[in-house]
Image (spheres, grey):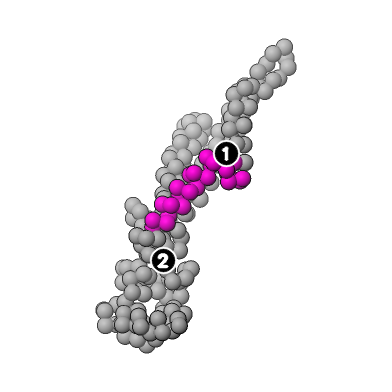
Amino acid sequence: MKLKKITSLTALFSFVVLTISSIVLYVMPHGRVAYWADWHFWGLAKADWDNMHINSGILFLVAVCIHIFLNWTLILAYINNRAKDVKHVTGEFMGALVLTLAVVVGTYLMVPPFTYTLELSESLKDRGEILYGNPPYGHAELSSIYVLSKRMGLDPEISMVNLKKSGTKVTGVDQSLLEVAKANQTNAKAIYQVMSQGQEGRKKGDRR
């Protein structure tokens, strides 16, 4: 096996995975929504896509670094022209550098057209809020039944009664909504909806 071929193919395959995960992360709902509604795509949750994106990115970076090392002489030939033994930076090199800097600086300064892609992503993520709903607060799925009930003006005892009446597997008010949701193969949003049944008036009264 040749190292150059392995490196090139690894860079290619990791780039494909990185591209797919980038597209998924670009369109997926905001994290608070994805975790609350247990959002999945192709059977993978948000955390799975995040982890895959990070590790495939690292693999791609390592493969590219090795590829550059193995092809350094050829890369120098792309960057420089030899004319009378004097090296000159090529137009291609300057074009690639200017294009890259334009994207980086334009994104930092938040000027069109670089803002358009960011606005589109934000719009797609906002649609996720409409489709899946918003949690009552950030990472509410990690709160226990007792804490969430108290924060939302619900009676923890009634919340437990509602869960048990619905046939939900639950052991106590100290369980987090995420734990209950996983035990019942559902999401935190559905658990919260069961908890709050018949307590809507109480919630409104608590907020006044």
Question: Looking at the picture, how far across and down is residue 95, in whole percent?
Answer: 60, 27
Q: Local crowd at mark 2 within 10 Å, few (<14), some, or many (≥20)?
A: some
Q: CA distance from mark 1 to mark 2?
A: 33 Å
Question: Looking at the picture, how far across and down is residue 190, in whole percent?
Answer: 33, 71
Please state the extent of the stretch shown in magenta in the rendering: 106-128
Task: Tell me if residue 23 is in the magenta stretch.
Answer: no
Q: Amino acid at mark 2?
A: Asn
Image label count? 2
**Considering the numbered disc 1 on the image, is that residue within a helix, a strand or a loop?**
helix
Q: Which residue is mark 1?
A: 103
Task: Tell me if residue 123 is in the magenta stretch.
Answer: yes
User: Would you place residue 169 above or below residue 32 in this image?
Assistant: below
- Regarding residue 154, the answer to whether it shows in the image is no
- Quarter residue 173 falls in: bottom left
Q: Local crowd at mark 1 within 10 Å, few (<14), some, or many (≥20)?
A: some
Q: Residue at x 43, y 40 (%)?
A: 16
User: Would you place residue 33 above or below residue 1 in this image?
Assistant: below
- Closer to the camera in the image, 205 or 106: 205
**Considering the numbered disc 2 on the image, is that residue within a helix, a strand or a loop?**
loop
Q: Residue at x 59, y 30 (%)?
A: 96
Which label is found at residue 134? 2
Q: Residue at x 69, y 13 (%)?
A: 83
- Closer to the camera in the image, 168 or 70: 168
Q: Earlier in the sequence, mark 1 or mark 2?
A: 1
User: Would you place residue 31 above or below residue 67 in this image?
Assistant: below
Q: Amino acid at mark 1?
A: Val
